[in-house]
Amino acid sequence: MSYLFLAFLGSALISLLFFNRQRPRKWRRVLIIIIALIGLGGSLMPVAAANSKKTSQHQVDVRENKAARANSSALKKQLATKKTEASQLTKQVASQSRLVKKQQKASESERVRAASASIAATNQASEAAQQQAAIQASQQAQQAASAQQVEQMVTIAPNSGKKYHLDPNCRGLSRANSTTTMPLSQAQAEGYTLCGWED
Ligand SMILES: [Zn+2]
């Protein structure tokens, strides 16, 4: 701009000198004013152009800033949405893992319950078996006892009275010269009665 202005000033001075020789004083002044106005305008034009360029650049900048800000706010919104989604997913995962844990606990307690039930059943079975065995033993003992009762033998002295003896070494037999044994029922059937020492 300053070069332009200097060039214009030079050309104006040259033309001024040229006209100075040929024109009257009145026209010279008018010419000076016109040249000065034109020069001012010419030198100011680039400034104005630069200013307007700056302004438009500024407007563009403002617009770009606005666009960038809008874009950034949209991105922020997207980010917020994603964050919300992520936190929701985290919550879902947490609740699902809680559910899984609960189910595991439930199945574990179910297993424990089943195991204790099976133990209880085994215990009951073993108790029942023991009872059965006890009953059988008792029945066998009773059978043996009744067999023994059936087989209960007594001692008699055929030539010394009509007494039978449960004890083969009874003092009531000490003077008998011969003794024999027979089942109690047979002795009773033959009229023998229990000895007075053992009554
Ligand atoms: Zn006796």
Image (cartoon, helix red, strand yellow):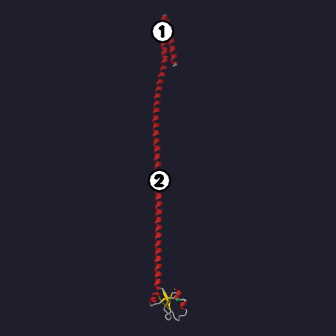
Residue 58 x, y percent position in the rendering: 48, 26
- Contact (CB < 8 A) between labels 2 and 1? no
Q: CA distance from mark 2 to mark 1?
A: 104 Å
Front residue of 25/140: it is 140
Mark 2 highlights which residue? 102
Q: Amino acid at mark 2?
A: Lys
Residue positioned most to the left = 189
Q: Nearer the viewer, residue 165 or 110?
A: 165
73 versus 47 height, above or below: below
Q: Looking at the picture, how far across and down is residue 44, in whole percent?
A: 49, 17
| Label 2 beta carbon less than 8 Å to ligand 1 | no
Residue drawn at the location 47% of the way across and 60% of the way down: 113
Q: Ligand 1 near label 1 (Cβ, under 8 Å)?
A: no
Question: How many numbered markers are drawn?
Answer: 2
Work out whether 1 lies above or below 71: above
Q: Which mark is residue 178?
A: none
Instruction: Indicate the amino acid at tag 1.
Output: Leu
Compare marks 2 and 1 and give the one earlier in the sequence. 1
Q: Which residue is mark 1?
A: 31
Question: In the image shown, does 20 or 47 lie closer to the viewer?
Answer: 47
**Position of residue 71 measured from the top left corner of the image (x, y, whole percent):** 45, 34
Q: Nearer the viewer, mark 2 or mark 1?
A: 2
Q: Nearer the viewer, residue 146 or 136?
A: 146
Label 1 sits on a secondary structure element that is: helix
Please tell me how crowded label 1 is: few (under 14), some (14-19), or many (20+) other residues with Cα within 10 Å. Answer: some
Disc 2 crowd, CA 10 A, few/some/many (<14, 14-19, 20+): few
Q: Secondary structure at mark 2?
A: helix
User: Where residue 91 sits: x, y (%)?
Assistant: 47, 46
Q: Residue at x 49, y 20 (%)?
A: 47
